[in-house]
Image (cartoon, rainbow, N blue to C red):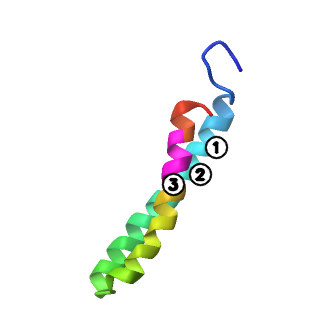
Amino acid sequence: MDSLGQNIGPKGRRKRLKGGLFPLAVGVIGGVALILSGASRWWRLLLLLPFWQGALGVFQALEGT
């Protein structure tokens, strides 16, 4: 671990940020598509997966872990 308390470098942080923003975008686009198509709430529950994956990637990038 370096002196800043982070265990990945800038390249790894960018990779995790990109790996988090893409699933978040998929979740937003999917949510809009499901709402506009009138899909039931049970189908929208599936959006939990991309939002969860995206949040993990973004939070890991911001924390440097």
Report the front residue among 11 and 20: 20
Mark 3 residue crowding within 10 angstroms, few (<14) / some (14–19) / many (20+):
many
Q: Secondary structure at mark 3?
A: helix
Q: CA distance from mark 3 to mark 1?
A: 12 Å
**Which three-letter amino acid code belongs to the residue tagged 1?**
Lys
| Residue 15 drawn above or below residue 50 | above
Residue 50: give x, y in percent of width and height: 50, 64
Residue 64 in the figure: left or right of residue 50: right
Q: Of marks 3 and 1, which one's residue comes earlier in the chain?
A: 1
Q: Of marks 3 and 2, which one's residue comes earlier in the chain?
A: 2
Residue in the image at 69% along x and 17% along y: 2
Residue 13: give x, y in percent of width and height: 61, 36
Q: Secondary structure at mark 1?
A: helix
Disc 1 target residue? 15
Residue 3: give x, y in percent of width and height: 65, 12
In the image, is residue 56 part of the stretch drawn in magenta?
Answer: yes
Q: Are marks 1 and 2 in contact (CB under 8 Å)?
A: yes
Please identify the quadrant where the N terminus is shown: top right
Disc 2 target residue? 19
Q: Nearer the viewer, mark 3 or mark 2?
A: 3
Residue in the image at 51% along x and 34% along y: 62
| Residue 21 in sight here | no
In the image, is residue 21 part of the stretch drawn in magenta?
Answer: no
Q: Nearer the viewer, mark 3 or mark 1?
A: 3
Q: Identify the disc placed on residue 54.
A: 3
Q: CA distance from mark 1 to mark 2?
A: 6 Å
The segment highlighted magenta reads 54-59
Q: Secondary structure at mark 2?
A: helix
**Which three-letter amino acid code belongs to the residue tagged 2?**
Gly
